């Protein structure tokens, strides 16, 4: 075996080893980011996803192999890293979304889509962020792109239904939920979201039925407990409302609305200290809720005095 051949073998092995190390490090950081996100440690999750992106986007910056002819001639080996970066961008975008930072969320979804144009979930995530920004046309376009990529992807139908509802077209929204449930008859989220539409239409029993179906199909569907809690509150069953809101919070303590609505129920029950703790938590999660909380708190207190 010639010395030249031996050198090539060593370089090839070292390059593969370095690339493998980066894959492993990127995956570990990504998994850590997901765990931190689930724990509600958003800033730490963002940092972990950012480091995962750095590792998965290129070879080790300290390695001279990045400049070697072996790596430069075999670009496919570098490009193979990029799907990891796309997923990390999308999940970092989800953390920004949870922090109500839609500009950064959309930026990360854009990056994920540029790397993987066929990444269906990224279009749905970006559509949801655009919907919160009141860019309903952009949101609908993203959901419809996702549908073209995967006609069986029910999240796209659910997302478009919500955007259509925001546009005031409840009937079209219900049609999309119907399409989603034809694709997946036991999808708990589709029932929960359709329940929200029925609730906005004040068809209370249909809403209650969908919420309860969602809970039976998926006892961890936090939003369904929230929706049913709203119906309990409307009926004056404040203790039942608190129970449902509490269950929702236990399932997902990152949602400001859960604390907000439980606070209203506590206030209606004359449990002012409990209410104020919930309001403070809601505002800490989503400061934009402060004005609505102040307005509704005042209305509930006036109602209490009138009784």
Image (spheres, rainbow, N blue to C red):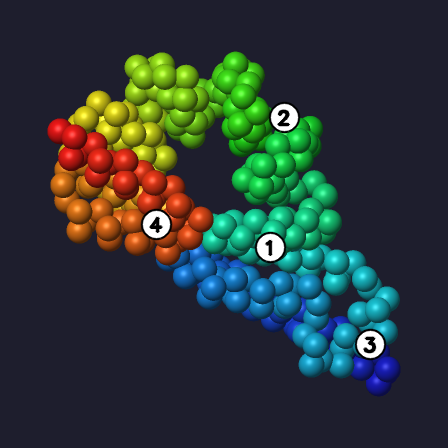
Provide the secondary structure element on which disc 1 rests.
Answer: helix
The residues bearing labels 4 and 3 have C-alpha atoms spaced at a distance of: 53 Å
Disc assigned to residue 151: 2
Circle nearer the N terminus (3, 2): 3
Disc assigned to residue 104: 1
Q: Residue at x 80, y 82 (%)?
A: 7
Q: Nearer the viewer, residue 301 or 251?
A: 301
On the image, the x and y values in percent for residue 98 come to 47, 50
Q: Residue at x 56, y 29 (%)?
A: 163
Provide the secondary structure element on which disc 4 rests.
Answer: helix
Nearer to us: label 4 or label 3:
4
The residues bearing labels 3 and 2 have C-alpha atoms spaced at a distance of: 44 Å
Provide the secondary structure element on which disc 2 rests.
Answer: loop
- Note whether residue 17 is visible: yes
Nearer to us: label 2 or label 4:
4
Disc assigned to residue 68: 3
From this view, report whether residue 9 is shown above or below residue 120: below
Residue most extreme to the bottom: 3
Circle nearer the N terminus (4, 1): 1
Q: Residue at x 52, y 14 (%)?
A: 171
Q: Does residue 287 appear to the left or right of 64 in the view shown? A: left
Q: Quadrant of the C terminus?
A: top left
Q: Residues within 10 Å of mark 2 (few under 14, many from 20)?
A: few
Provide the secondary structure element on which disc 3 rests.
Answer: loop
């Amino acid at each position: 075996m010639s010395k030249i051949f031996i050198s090539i073998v060593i370089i090839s092995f070292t390059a593969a080893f370095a690339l493998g190390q980066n894959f492993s490090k990127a995956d570990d950081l990504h998994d850590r980011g997901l765990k931190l996100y689930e724990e509600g440690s958003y800033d730490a999750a963002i940092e972990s996803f950012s480091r995962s992106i750095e590792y998965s986007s290129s070879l080790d910056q300290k390695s001279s192999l990045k400049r070697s002819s072996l790596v430069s001639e075999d670009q496919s080996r570098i490009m193979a890293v990029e799907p990891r970066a796309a997923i990390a961008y999308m999940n970092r975008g989800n953390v920004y979304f949870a922090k109500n930072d839609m500009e950064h969320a959309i930026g990360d979804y854009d990056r994920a889509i540029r790397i993987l144009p066929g990444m269906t979930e990224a279009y749905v995530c970006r559509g949801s962020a655009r919907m919160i920004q009141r860019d309903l046309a952009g949101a609908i376009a993203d959901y419809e792109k996702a549908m073209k990529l995967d006609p069986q992807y029910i999240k796209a139908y659910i997302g478009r239904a919500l955007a259509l509802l925001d546009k005031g077209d409840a009937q079209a929204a219900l049609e999309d939920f119907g399409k989603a449930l034809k694709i997946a008859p036991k999808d708990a989220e589709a029932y929960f979201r359709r329940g929200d539409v029925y609730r906005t239409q004040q068809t209370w029993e249909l809403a209650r039925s969908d919420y309860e179906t969602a809970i039976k199909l998926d006892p961890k569907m936090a939003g369904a407990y929230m929706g049913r809690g709203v119906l309990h509150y409307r009926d004056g069953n404040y203790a039942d409302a608190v129970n449902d809101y509490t269950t929702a919070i236990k399932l997902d303590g990152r949602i400001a609305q859960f604390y907000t609505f439980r606070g209203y129920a506590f206030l209606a029950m004359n449990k002012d200290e409990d209410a104020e703790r919930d309001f403070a938590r809601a505002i800490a999660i989503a400061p934009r809720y402060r004005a609505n909380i102040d307005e509704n708190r005042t209305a509930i207190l006036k109602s209490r005095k009138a009784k």
